[in-house]
Amino acid sequence: MMKKYLLGLLVFGFMIAMASCEDDPVDPIDIDDDDDPVDSTEVPLSGAAEYHPLEVGNYWVYEFTYEDENGQPIEDDPDYETYSNTLRVEEEAEFEGRTAFRISTSSTSGDEISDQWYSADEDAIYVYVDENQDMGELEGLISFDEIPSGWMKVFSMENETIELAQIDLDQNIDFGELSLGLSGDLTMKLKTEENGTYNYEDNEYESRMSTGISDFDGDITIMGLPGAFPISAITNEESIYIKGIGIVETSTQSEVESTIFEFIGEGVEEEIVIERSMLIEYSVK
């Protein structure tokens, strides 16, 4: 189970880093004060907004599965069971300077997931990150000193790679009686690019890909034991957006390598897990 939480920490770290870029000299997620918010009741969808239609009543259902490095389903492991999430647009409102839409998420996994505000214009799609962001399964296990609030870019119509942040991570993680220290350098990037056409339900759609990349290199310590265990981890989260529907597929590949897994009796030194979500039902206006 510890491996799954470490993977989750890195994915969540990507979200935090994107929201933390306001301290970076080059801030890719700032929205110009002169930009007019999009009013969906007056302006037809265009550009980036077409790739994630936001209107009250729209919903998307995703099925999540796990695969090993060979693309084979991970079975008979309670840490990697199949589940589904339903995202539904609940409300439209002026929120933090933009016309925004509140999206709720319900999950068959039993996790309680906080609602999030989305906003889209011709150039990009944004998610509002709150300083009290819900950490799902990680809640209570880890705590970050500060998560700045603000709009973060998660999709762009430009083909670009944004250097988001470099974070000096120093974090304690508690697993019952086992207390770990995780320290090192966490580097974050966001890459957006054309993805040609995507075949979904026997129809061809224009598509674009947005990829979050995190690279961690550091050490893990175990309370009560001398020394540290080196650890390296890379996470790539690729989301495919198709015009007129939204995200149709997300693939998150996480690779963690450390001798600590052998020490605590959790198997191999290197762990590669692929989490894949596929759109199985939707309704957009």
Image (cartoon, rainbow, N blue to C red):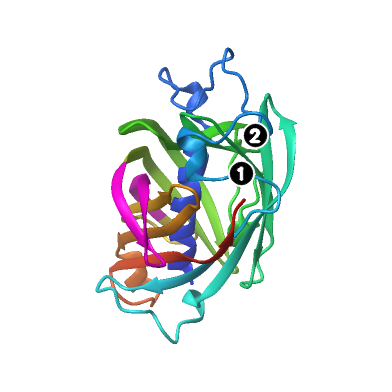
> Which kind of residue does numbered mark 2 sit on?
Ser
Q: Main secondary structure of the magenta part?
A: strand
- Residue, x 32% and y 68% (percent of image)? 271
- Against 206, is 264 above or below? below
Few, some or many C-alpha atoms within 10 Å of disc 1 (few <14, some 14-19, many ≥20)? many
Q: Is residue 209 left or right of residue 84?
A: left
* Magenta-drawn stretch contains 197: yes
Sequence-first tag of 1 and 2: 2
Residue in front for this viewpoint, 240 or 140: 240
Residue 57 % position (x, y) = 70, 53
- Against 246, is 75 above or below? below
Residue in front for this viewpoint, 241 or 44: 44
Span colored in magenta: 194-220
Q: Which mark is residue 163?
A: none
Residue 64 % position (x, y) = 48, 69
Q: Which residue is mark 1?
A: 54
- Residue, x 36% and y 66% (percent of image)? 274
Q: Which residue is mark 2?
A: 40
> Which kind of residue does numbered mark 1 sit on?
Leu
- Label 1 element class: loop
Mark 1–mark 2 Cα distance, whole angstroms, equals 8 Å
Residue 99 % position (x, y) = 67, 30
- Residue, x 67% and y 41% (percent of image)? 101
* Magenta-drawn stretch contains 237: no
- Against 144, is 122 above or below? above
Residue in front for this viewpoint, 41 or 63: 41
Residue most extreme to the left: 70
